[in-house]
Amino acid sequence: MKAIYKRELQSYFHSFLGALFIGATLLLLGIYFTVYDLFMGYPYIGYALSSVVFLFLISIPVLTMKVLAEERHQKTDQLILTSPISVGSIVTGKFLALITVFAVPIAIISLYPVILNLFGTVDFGESYLAILGFFLYGAACISICMFVSSLTESQVIAAVISFGILFLTYVMSGICNMISSTGNLLTKILGAFDMVSRFDDLLNGSLHISSIVYYLSVIVLFLVFTVQSIQKRRYQISKKTLGIGTYSSSIMIIITAAVVLLNVFVSEIPARFTVFDVTADRLYSLSDETKEFVKGLSEDVNIYVLSNESQCDATLITTLQNYEGLNSHIKISYVDPAVNPKFYTQYTDSSITQNSIIVEGSKRSKVIDYSEIYETEFDYMTYSSTVTGYDGEGQITSAIAYVTTDEMPKIYFITGHDELSFESAFVSAVEKENVEYETINLMDYDEVPEDASCVIINAPAADLSDDDTSKMLDYMEKGGDVFLITAYTGTELTNFNKLLDFYGVTVTEGLIIESAVSNYYQDPFYLLPDVTYDAVTENVYNSGSYVFAPYATGMSVNETEGIETICLLSSSDKSYVRNNIESSNDYSRQEGDAEGPFAIGVKCIKDTDGESSVGIIYSCESLFTETVDSMVAGTNMKLFTSTLGSFVSHTSSISIPVKNLETEYLTIPQGIIIILALLTVVVIPFAVLVYGFIIWLKRRKQ
């Protein structure tokens, strides 16, 4: 085999064919690499690779057309076939030589992610998985074309037939959709010839073992076919011809059946054993919180996806497969709207979009519209939307918890005092906590509703009335819980402060200025408070992330019997509070500034006639806003959901943050772009072509 390998490899590098293949591959890839990665700044090599796979339809048939057909045409195959070398060794040697030629551009391509990483952040796991998929796809195409080359002595016929077969595999997905959008036995059979979809599975950062097994199976299958094709010619026509032909056909049938059974077996293995997330941020994996919760389910949950499975969002399918693999109580069903357009009306009166999800339990159901699965951001300059986050896990986990819980707690947002309204992301977080919520004005009620699990007052700019204050204090005296956020108004809110005083908390007049460098970001008013471990701050504390609290007021706690106080967030002992900030010229400590440290978040538990009233208070009005939260990549949101969860503690209180999908574009200087573009599109490809031409010319003159 080694001799065959060396002989075949030399034939490619001593002729123009090998250089033509390598140069053409690098040239076309270089063009797409320049457009997507250099000029547009995408940090994903997969974009370029997926755009050039059509090149295989031409380049690989040309590369392989002579590998066996020419030997048969020149009758030189007789020398090999009569040698003591086994046919399997001959085929393997030739195949490895072809793979070596193909590996040259792959090796050069493998340097591209490293180069891109110099100008930003590149996900190496996702990039090299895409390169692996590209290599396996190409290797499978080579094995198919090798088999075709063994069937004929005409190189042209071998190339044409190879092109036809590869073209069919390239468009097979579209053919299947044309035959049946819902899928049937015929499309399942034809789907076995769909090589592109397996490559696509490896482009999104998920390592699909089924795709790897598929490509390796194709390679082995067609190498065996090639061996059997040559084996039949090793014998002259005789009485044994029928027996040899039968033996050859039997081997091919057995191998084909084994390959089919292997792929069917792998496809039936639960996704948690065959699909692995290789992205740096684990975008397509389920969190430990979800895994723990789902594994503990003891009742059936049906998840209906309003889409044909073959047309469903690939990322969503992967997520759903992960759920299904965790617990046998979860059943996934795909309902094609084209076949059953009124199915969703059993669960909602509103119209919903394709790919939407319906989660049904024994107690209730919940509809997740497809628009809620992806978070988008609208650009008013270009009037276009950009996908910024994937919330599939968050929405599905929350829905499962919702349909299986026995209780549904309720919280109330108080209005009527110029409170800040929570933005959509935080309202969505409340919904994912599986609680009912309502915004009320206390003027319309004789008392705080009895079913309140918690009352939230978010940064009132105006003071509470005496009547509203009385209702709130009466609610708190009976053991009611409150979630309070203070605002810096420049004026004293006497009645609102009575609610704080109920827990022994006093707000200092003025804003905190932080002089400890590690406790602020860019500006001394932009606080990064110290986080104390508690059930409320556990997620933030364990992650080691910063909480961002700009323009916070300080709080002091009076030790009072019957009140347990835990400081959640605090400034450093180098901080101080200044009241008249408008007239301040610098950040240095001045006479009259109150010295820190100060509490920025506190949790108070007060015993009242055998009941416990819990109050969690934060002294930063913008703490729970989307702009501030984005500065610390969702840490403030984690604090919000854990705070809310502490008031509505139940089995359905599970909130998974949105997974960020925003592309961190590369920043490449224009001069570097030009240099890299010239290297990848001109210098390297044409250097290979020139080298191949020189070698070919020298050998022709000999």
Image: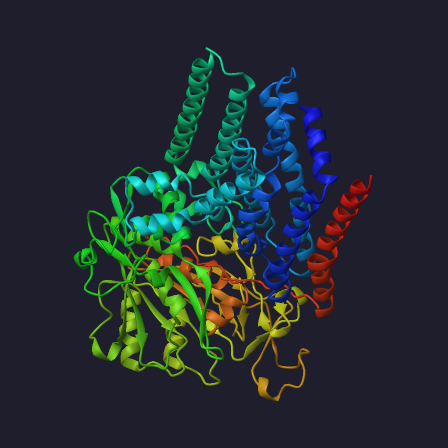
Of 187 and 144, the residue lying toward us: 144
Figure colour scheme: rainbow
Of 199 and 548, the residue lying toward us: 199
Classify the position of the N terminus by image quarter: top right
The image quadrant that residue 351 belongs to is bottom left
Classify the position of the C terminus by image quarter: top right
Say left or right for 426 vs 511. Answer: left
Of 594 and 125, the residue lying toward us: 125
Residue at 33% x, 51% y: name it: 177
Of 619 and 631, the residue lying toward us: 631
Compared to 501, does 271 lie above or below? above
Total count of labels: 0
Report whether residue 285 is seen.
no
Q: Position of residue 605 (x, y in %)?
A: 39, 59
Residue at 43% x, 47% y: name it: 286
Q: Position of residue 175 (x, y in %)?
A: 36, 49
Residue furthest out toward the top? 239
Q: Position of residue 601 (x, y in %)?
A: 48, 65
Say left or right for 641 vs 513. Answer: left
Report whether residue 598 is seen.
yes
Q: Where is residue 606 in the image (x, y as percent from the top left)?
A: 37, 61
The image quadrant that residue 138 belongs to is top right
